[in-house]
Structures are given as C-alpha cells and as structure tokens.
Image: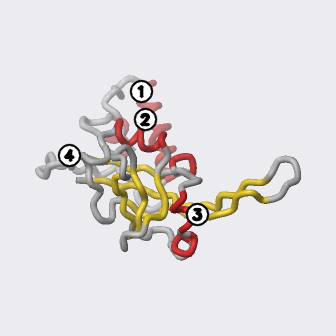
Amino acid sequence: MQLVDGFGISLDETESERRLFYVGMTRAKEELVLCSTRQSLFVMESGVNTKSLSPATTSLPRQMFYSDLSPGDVYLGHHSTKNSQHIITHLQEGTPLKFQSNRYNNGWDIFTTQGQIIGALSKKANAELAYKGFRPGQFQFQASEVIVRSIYRHLRKDEVNGNITEDWFVVIPQIRVCR
C-alpha cells in the first residue's frame, strides 16, 4: 500500500490515511508494506517502525509488458488449430510457446517449442501488439516470454437444430516480456 504524497497533516487527511491503512491491514494476507516518499503524521502516530531505503542503484527494464490473452485474441478458426488437436490437447498451462511472424509478416503465429504451428493470433490482437511495439519482422519474442495460459474449447452449435457444427481446442497464450 502506498501512502501517497497528497496526504497532509490536517485532521481530515489523517483520517483518510487511517481508513486507507485499515483497508490495507484487513486485506493483507501475510505482510503489509507501506511506502511513502515523505513522513506521514498518521504513520508517526501509529508507532510503526519505519525504515528509509536508498534509491535503487539498478536500472529498470527498458521494456515490460504482460498480457493474459483471451479467446477473442486468437484466430479460433485457423487451419493449423484444427489440424493440430493431437498436439494441443496434450499441452498444459505454463507450457512454453513461441510466437513467430506469419508468412505475410503482418501477424503472429503460435508454435510449440518444437516448431509445430498450433494457431495464430486474431487481427485485433496483432494490431494491439503492433501498437505496443511488438511488430512481426521487427520484434522477436524470447524463450519463456510466451506460455500457455489456458486451453479453450471452441464449440458452436447450429441455431436451428442444435447440432454441433464446430468443436475443437484452442491454445490461449500469456505474454510476459521484461527486458
């Protein structure tokens, strides 16, 4: 929990700090860490032992991105998804994947680490990733930056007779880039 610098020493502001502290305290599972860039009257009154930290000497990563993709981010009808059911059904959450540029260099295909194509991202997801600087042909995802978030069962029924018209599993990736 961060006690932001907008808190002051007036009674109303101290009461806001107390409420914020109480919320943090009641929600903390194992440990409660309070952070502030200046002294807080409420923290001083509470008797909590404070510790000053020196500024970090290490540099922050240049690029950080995290995304839990959803079924809407994956091209559900991609031919390789339908043809790779024997591979997809054996994958588990957390299994490493690879994103590689598609043959048109305008989107990302999804591969196993053994190089088997098992799907592709949707146009929407490709556009969002390109907007964030992850453009096919210009960016390379590294090992362990893309993993299986979940396996989604794509099921579609005919609206008239209720018969199943589409039924296959689709890999939903998770992206974690920290460089």
Circle on res. 82? 3
Q: Residues within 10 Å of mark 1 (few under 14, many from 20)?
A: some
Q: Earlier in the sequence, mark 3 or mark 2?
A: 2
Circle on res. 13? 1
In three-dimensional space, the C-alpha distance between marks 3 and 1, rounded to whole angstroms, equals 59 Å
Circle on res. 62? 4
Secondary-structure class at tag 4: loop
Q: Compared with residue 141, is residue 123 higher up or lower down, i.e. above or below?
A: above
In three-dimensional space, the C-alpha distance between marks 4 and 3, rounded to whole angstroms, equals 38 Å
Q: Indicate the quadrant where residue 165 lies.
A: bottom right
Q: Is residue 45 left or right of residue 16?
A: left
Q: Residues within 10 Å of mark 2 (few under 14, many from 20)?
A: many
Foreground tag (3 vs 2): 3
- Report which residue position mark 2 lands on: 17
Foreground tag (4 vs 3): 3
**Residue contact between numbered discs 1 and 2, judged by CB atoms under 8 Å:** yes
Type of amino acid at the residue the image marks with label 1 = Glu
